[in-house]
Image (cartoon, rainbow, N blue to C red):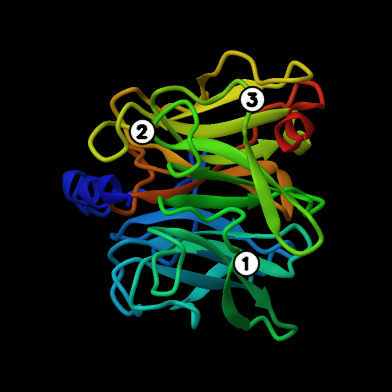
Protein backbone atom coordinates (compact mmCIF):
# COMPACT_ATOMS: atom_id res chain seq x y z
CA UNK A 1 0.00 0.00 0.00
CA UNK A 2 1.01 3.59 -0.42
CA UNK A 3 2.99 4.08 2.80
CA UNK A 4 5.20 6.57 0.99
CA UNK A 5 2.40 9.14 1.08
CA UNK A 6 2.01 8.79 4.83
CA UNK A 7 5.78 9.05 5.20
CA UNK A 8 5.76 12.15 3.02
CA UNK A 9 3.08 13.72 5.21
CA UNK A 10 5.48 13.59 8.15
CA UNK A 11 8.40 14.92 6.14
CA UNK A 12 6.66 17.96 4.71
CA UNK A 13 5.01 19.32 7.86
CA UNK A 14 1.82 21.34 7.88
CA UNK A 15 2.67 25.06 7.99
CA UNK A 16 0.12 27.32 6.36
CA UNK A 17 1.45 29.73 3.75
CA UNK A 18 0.68 33.38 4.22
CA UNK A 19 0.03 33.94 0.52
CA UNK A 20 -3.02 32.49 -1.25
CA UNK A 21 -2.56 34.00 -4.72
CA UNK A 22 -2.24 31.73 -7.73
CA UNK A 23 1.06 31.73 -9.60
CA UNK A 24 0.96 32.08 -13.38
CA UNK A 25 2.34 28.56 -13.81
CA UNK A 26 -0.25 26.89 -11.59
CA UNK A 27 -2.83 27.62 -8.91
CA UNK A 28 -3.78 25.89 -5.70
CA UNK A 29 -7.20 24.22 -5.65
CA UNK A 30 -9.61 25.27 -2.91
CA UNK A 31 -7.28 26.87 -0.38
CA UNK A 32 -8.43 25.97 3.13
CA UNK A 33 -11.33 23.81 1.89
CA UNK A 34 -9.83 21.25 -0.49
CA UNK A 35 -6.14 21.98 0.05
CA UNK A 36 -5.64 22.14 3.81
CA UNK A 37 -2.94 21.48 6.43
CA UNK A 38 -3.58 17.77 5.78
CA UNK A 39 -2.51 15.62 2.80
CA UNK A 40 -4.77 15.75 -0.25
CA UNK A 41 -4.12 13.51 -3.25
CA UNK A 42 -5.77 13.06 -6.67
CA UNK A 43 -8.56 15.57 -7.13
CA UNK A 44 -11.44 14.50 -9.40
CA UNK A 45 -13.91 17.03 -10.81
CA UNK A 46 -17.40 15.81 -11.67
CA UNK A 47 -18.11 16.45 -15.37
CA UNK A 48 -20.73 19.10 -14.57
CA UNK A 49 -18.09 20.98 -12.56
CA UNK A 50 -20.25 21.09 -9.42
CA UNK A 51 -18.35 18.63 -7.18
CA UNK A 52 -14.75 17.81 -6.49
CA UNK A 53 -13.71 14.55 -4.79
CA UNK A 54 -10.24 13.79 -3.49
CA UNK A 55 -8.38 11.40 -1.19
CA UNK A 56 -6.83 12.32 2.14
CA UNK A 57 -4.55 10.18 4.29
CA UNK A 58 -4.93 12.08 7.55
CA UNK A 59 -7.96 14.40 7.56
CA UNK A 60 -10.08 13.94 10.65
CA UNK A 61 -13.76 13.10 10.38
CA UNK A 62 -13.78 10.21 7.93
CA UNK A 63 -14.58 6.57 8.49
CA UNK A 64 -11.00 5.32 8.24
CA UNK A 65 -7.41 6.49 8.01
CA UNK A 66 -7.54 7.16 4.24
CA UNK A 67 -10.85 8.58 3.11
CA UNK A 68 -12.60 10.17 0.15
CA UNK A 69 -13.80 13.75 0.59
CA UNK A 70 -15.89 16.08 -1.53
CA UNK A 71 -16.78 19.75 -1.77
CA UNK A 72 -19.48 21.60 -3.70
CA UNK A 73 -19.12 24.57 -6.04
CA UNK A 74 -21.07 27.43 -4.43
CA UNK A 75 -20.75 31.03 -5.65
CA UNK A 76 -17.73 30.03 -7.70
CA UNK A 77 -15.79 28.53 -4.78
CA UNK A 78 -15.38 25.05 -3.33
CA UNK A 79 -17.32 24.91 -0.07
CA UNK A 80 -18.87 22.46 2.42
CA UNK A 81 -16.16 19.77 2.54
CA UNK A 82 -17.39 16.43 3.84
CA UNK A 83 -16.38 12.75 3.78
CA UNK A 84 -18.19 10.49 1.34
CA UNK A 85 -20.77 8.01 2.60
CA UNK A 86 -19.03 5.18 0.70
CA UNK A 87 -15.94 5.40 2.92
CA UNK A 88 -15.12 2.34 5.01
CA UNK A 89 -12.98 1.74 8.08
CA UNK A 90 -10.27 0.61 5.63
CA UNK A 91 -8.38 2.72 3.07
CA UNK A 92 -10.42 4.43 0.32
CA UNK A 93 -8.41 6.46 -2.17
CA UNK A 94 -7.63 7.58 -5.75
CA UNK A 95 -11.09 8.80 -6.89
CA UNK A 96 -12.00 9.61 -10.48
CA UNK A 97 -15.37 10.24 -12.14
CA UNK A 98 -16.29 8.64 -15.43
CA UNK A 99 -16.62 11.12 -18.29
CA UNK A 100 -20.41 10.74 -18.32
CA UNK A 101 -20.60 11.44 -14.59
CA UNK A 102 -22.37 8.16 -13.89
CA UNK A 103 -19.64 6.47 -11.84
CA UNK A 104 -17.05 7.33 -9.24
CA UNK A 105 -14.04 4.99 -9.42
CA UNK A 106 -11.56 4.49 -6.55
CA UNK A 107 -9.49 1.86 -4.78
CA UNK A 108 -10.02 0.30 -1.37
CA UNK A 109 -8.58 -2.47 0.79
CA UNK A 110 -11.90 -3.05 2.55
CA UNK A 111 -12.86 -6.63 3.44
CA UNK A 112 -14.23 -8.78 0.63
CA UNK A 113 -11.70 -7.84 -2.03
CA UNK A 114 -9.51 -10.04 -4.21
CA UNK A 115 -6.20 -9.09 -2.63
CA UNK A 116 -4.64 -5.94 -1.17
CA UNK A 117 -5.90 -2.68 -2.69
CA UNK A 118 -8.74 -3.42 -5.15
CA UNK A 119 -10.51 -1.26 -7.73
CA UNK A 120 -14.12 -0.26 -7.02
CA UNK A 121 -16.77 2.04 -8.37
CA UNK A 122 -20.01 3.51 -7.03
CA UNK A 123 -22.92 4.82 -9.06
CA UNK A 124 -23.58 8.56 -8.82
CA UNK A 125 -27.29 9.03 -8.08
CA UNK A 126 -29.45 11.74 -9.63
CA UNK A 127 -29.31 13.76 -6.41
CA UNK A 128 -25.51 13.58 -6.29
CA UNK A 129 -25.33 10.90 -3.60
CA UNK A 130 -23.53 7.60 -4.13
CA UNK A 131 -24.73 4.04 -4.38
CA UNK A 132 -23.02 1.04 -2.85
CA UNK A 133 -19.38 0.40 -3.70
CA UNK A 134 -18.95 -2.35 -6.31
CA UNK A 135 -15.74 -4.38 -6.62
CA UNK A 136 -14.63 -4.40 -10.28
CA UNK A 137 -13.87 -8.10 -10.11
CA UNK A 138 -11.00 -10.44 -10.88
CA UNK A 139 -10.63 -9.08 -14.42
CA UNK A 140 -8.68 -6.14 -12.98
CA UNK A 141 -8.13 -7.05 -9.32
CA UNK A 142 -5.30 -9.41 -8.39
CA UNK A 143 -3.83 -10.68 -5.13
CA UNK A 144 -1.58 -7.62 -5.23
CA UNK A 145 -2.44 -3.92 -5.18
CA UNK A 146 -4.37 -2.00 -7.85
CA UNK A 147 -4.37 1.80 -7.81
CA UNK A 148 -5.69 4.86 -9.64
CA UNK A 149 -8.54 3.56 -11.85
CA UNK A 150 -8.91 5.87 -14.86
CA UNK A 151 -11.71 5.17 -17.36
CA UNK A 152 -11.33 6.34 -20.95
CA UNK A 153 -13.64 9.08 -22.17
CA UNK A 154 -15.84 6.55 -23.99
CA UNK A 155 -15.83 4.16 -21.00
CA UNK A 156 -14.48 1.24 -23.04
CA UNK A 157 -11.05 1.04 -21.40
CA UNK A 158 -9.77 1.29 -17.86
CA UNK A 159 -6.23 2.48 -17.14
CA UNK A 160 -4.78 1.47 -13.76
CA UNK A 161 -1.61 0.45 -11.91
CA UNK A 162 -0.93 -3.01 -10.46
CA UNK A 163 1.85 -5.12 -9.02
CA UNK A 164 -0.15 -8.31 -9.42
CA UNK A 165 -0.32 -8.96 -13.18
CA UNK A 166 3.37 -9.40 -13.96
CA UNK A 167 5.00 -6.79 -16.15
CA UNK A 168 8.36 -5.04 -16.22
CA UNK A 169 8.77 -4.84 -12.46
CA UNK A 170 7.18 -3.49 -9.29
CA UNK A 171 3.98 -1.52 -10.14
CA UNK A 172 3.17 -1.19 -13.84
CA UNK A 173 0.46 0.52 -15.86
CA UNK A 174 -2.19 -1.62 -17.54
CA UNK A 175 -5.27 -1.12 -19.72
CA UNK A 176 -8.32 -3.40 -19.45
CA UNK A 177 -11.24 -3.44 -21.88
CA UNK A 178 -14.99 -3.54 -21.18
CA UNK A 179 -16.39 -6.85 -22.42
CA UNK A 180 -20.05 -6.04 -21.87
CA UNK A 181 -20.06 -7.29 -18.29
CA UNK A 182 -16.78 -6.17 -16.72
CA UNK A 183 -13.34 -4.73 -17.38
CA UNK A 184 -10.99 -7.62 -18.13
CA UNK A 185 -7.87 -8.89 -19.91
CA UNK A 186 -5.43 -6.19 -18.76
CA UNK A 187 -2.50 -5.46 -21.08
CA UNK A 188 0.64 -3.44 -20.25
CA UNK A 189 0.63 0.16 -21.47
CA UNK A 190 3.15 0.02 -24.34
CA UNK A 191 6.45 1.85 -23.92
CA UNK A 192 5.95 3.08 -20.35
CA UNK A 193 6.70 0.35 -17.82
CA UNK A 194 10.19 -0.17 -16.38
CA UNK A 195 11.79 -1.91 -13.40
CA UNK A 196 10.67 1.10 -11.31
CA UNK A 197 7.15 1.82 -10.01
CA UNK A 198 4.82 3.35 -12.63
CA UNK A 199 1.37 4.38 -11.39
CA UNK A 200 -1.12 7.29 -11.18
CA UNK A 201 -1.68 7.84 -14.91
CA UNK A 202 -3.92 10.17 -16.92
CA UNK A 203 -4.55 10.06 -20.65
CA UNK A 204 -4.34 13.31 -22.60
CA UNK A 205 -6.06 13.71 -25.96
CA UNK A 206 -7.82 10.33 -25.66
CA UNK A 207 -4.46 8.59 -25.28
CA UNK A 208 -2.30 10.50 -27.75
CA UNK A 209 -0.22 11.36 -24.68
CA UNK A 210 0.01 10.07 -21.12
CA UNK A 211 1.07 11.64 -17.81
CA UNK A 212 2.12 9.22 -15.08
CA UNK A 213 4.04 8.94 -11.81
CA UNK A 214 7.33 7.07 -11.53
CA UNK A 215 9.48 6.18 -8.52
CA UNK A 216 12.43 3.83 -8.15
CA UNK A 217 10.68 2.61 -4.98
CA UNK A 218 7.30 4.15 -4.18
CA UNK A 219 7.53 3.17 -0.52
CA UNK A 220 10.81 4.97 0.10
CA UNK A 221 11.96 7.19 -2.79
CA UNK A 222 10.77 10.46 -4.41
CA UNK A 223 7.91 10.41 -6.93
CA UNK A 224 7.96 12.44 -10.15
CA UNK A 225 5.44 12.97 -12.94
CA UNK A 226 6.40 12.18 -16.54
CA UNK A 227 4.90 12.92 -19.95
CA UNK A 228 5.11 10.63 -22.99
CA UNK A 229 3.64 10.97 -26.49
CA UNK A 230 2.24 8.09 -28.57
CA UNK A 231 4.07 7.23 -31.83
CA UNK A 232 1.09 5.28 -33.16
CA UNK A 233 1.74 2.00 -31.36
CA UNK A 234 3.67 2.79 -28.16
CA UNK A 235 4.61 5.71 -25.98
CA UNK A 236 7.97 7.27 -26.68
CA UNK A 237 10.62 8.53 -24.30
CA UNK A 238 9.12 9.88 -21.09
CA UNK A 239 10.28 13.31 -19.95
CA UNK A 240 9.54 15.05 -16.63
CA UNK A 241 6.30 17.03 -16.67
CA UNK A 242 7.16 20.73 -16.97
CA UNK A 243 6.16 21.96 -13.52
CA UNK A 244 8.54 23.78 -11.19
CA UNK A 245 7.91 21.65 -8.10
CA UNK A 246 7.97 18.39 -10.08
CA UNK A 247 11.59 17.73 -9.21
CA UNK A 248 13.73 14.63 -8.91
CA UNK A 249 13.87 15.14 -5.13
CA UNK A 250 10.18 15.91 -4.60
CA UNK A 251 6.88 14.06 -4.44
CA UNK A 252 4.44 14.88 -7.25
CA UNK A 253 1.68 12.45 -8.23
CA UNK A 254 -2.06 11.95 -8.77
CA UNK A 255 -2.61 13.60 -12.20
CA UNK A 256 -6.27 13.85 -13.27
CA UNK A 257 -7.86 15.66 -16.22
CA UNK A 258 -10.76 17.94 -15.31
CA UNK A 259 -13.60 16.52 -17.44
CA UNK A 260 -15.34 19.89 -17.12
CA UNK A 261 -12.23 21.70 -18.44
CA UNK A 262 -10.28 19.08 -20.43
CA UNK A 263 -7.46 21.51 -21.12
CA UNK A 264 -6.59 21.57 -17.41
CA UNK A 265 -4.88 19.03 -15.18
CA UNK A 266 -5.02 18.56 -11.42
CA UNK A 267 -1.88 17.22 -9.72
CA UNK A 268 -0.82 16.61 -6.12
CA UNK A 269 2.41 17.95 -4.71
CA UNK A 270 4.06 20.55 -2.54
CA UNK A 271 4.93 23.93 -4.03
CA UNK A 272 6.77 26.62 -2.07
CA UNK A 273 3.82 28.95 -2.67
CA UNK A 274 0.90 28.94 -2.64
CA UNK A 275 0.90 26.19 -0.04
CA UNK A 276 -1.73 24.99 2.42
CA UNK A 277 0.07 22.16 4.17
CA UNK A 278 1.52 18.75 3.39
CA UNK A 279 0.32 17.48 -0.01
CA UNK A 280 -1.92 19.98 -1.80
CA UNK A 281 -3.96 19.89 -5.00
CA UNK A 282 -2.82 22.18 -7.81
CA UNK A 283 -4.33 23.09 -11.18
CA UNK A 284 -2.21 23.61 -14.28
CA UNK A 285 -2.64 23.80 -18.03
CA UNK A 286 -2.55 20.29 -19.46
CA UNK A 287 0.45 19.72 -21.75
CA UNK A 288 -0.29 19.33 -25.44
CA UNK A 289 -1.08 15.83 -26.70
CA UNK A 290 1.05 16.03 -29.84
CA UNK A 291 1.29 12.27 -30.37
CA UNK A 292 -0.77 9.94 -32.53
CA UNK A 293 -3.68 7.62 -31.89
CA UNK A 294 -3.01 3.93 -31.38
CA UNK A 295 -1.48 3.47 -27.94
CA UNK A 296 -4.77 2.83 -26.16
CA UNK A 297 -6.01 0.33 -28.75
CA UNK A 298 -2.59 -1.37 -28.85
CA UNK A 299 -2.70 -1.85 -25.08
CA UNK A 300 -6.26 -3.21 -25.16
CA UNK A 301 -5.65 -5.80 -27.90
The residue indicated by pointer 3 is 190
Towards the viewer: 9 or 23: 9
Q: Is residue 171 left or right of residue 300?
A: left
**Cβ atoms at labels 2 and 3 below 8 Å apart:** no
Judged from the image, the secondary structure of the residue bearing numbered disc 3 is loop
Which badge, 2 or 1, is on the more N-terminal residue?
Answer: 1
Q: Is residue 31 something that shows in the picture?
A: no
Label 1 environment density (alpha carbons within 10 Å; few <14, some 14–19, many ≥20): many
Judged from the image, the secondary structure of the residue bearing numbered disc 1 is strand
Q: In the figure, 80 relative to 159: above or below?
A: below
In the image, which disc is placed on residue 223? Answer: 2
Which badge, 2 or 3, is on the more N-terminal residue?
Answer: 3
* Whole-number angstrom distance, CA of label 2 to CA of label 3: 21 Å
Q: In the figure, 284 relative to 120: above or below?
A: above
Furthest residue to the bottom?
127
Which badge, 1 or 3, is on the more N-terminal residue?
Answer: 1
Q: In this view, does 18 lie to the left or right of 195?
A: left
The residue indicated by pointer 1 is 104
Q: Name the spot of residue 68 as percent of width and height, x first.
A: 45, 69
Q: In the figure, 228 relative to 123: above or below?
A: above
Towards the viewer: 183 or 130: 183
Q: In the figure, 100 relative to 254: above or below?
A: below
Q: Quadrant of the C terminus?
A: top right
Label 3 environment density (alpha carbons within 10 Å; few <14, some 14–19, many ≥20): some
What's the residue at 74%, 16% (across, down)?
A: 231
Residue 39 found in image quarter = bottom left
Amino acid sequence: MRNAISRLSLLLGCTLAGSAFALSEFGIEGMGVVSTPHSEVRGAIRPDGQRIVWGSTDRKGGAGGWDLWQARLIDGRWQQPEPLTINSAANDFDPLFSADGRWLYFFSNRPGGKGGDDLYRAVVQADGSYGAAENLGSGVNSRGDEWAPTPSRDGKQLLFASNGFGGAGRHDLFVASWNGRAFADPKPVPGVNTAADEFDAAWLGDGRAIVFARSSDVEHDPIRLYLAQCDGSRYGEATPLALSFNTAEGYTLGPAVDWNKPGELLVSGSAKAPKAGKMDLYRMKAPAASGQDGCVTTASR
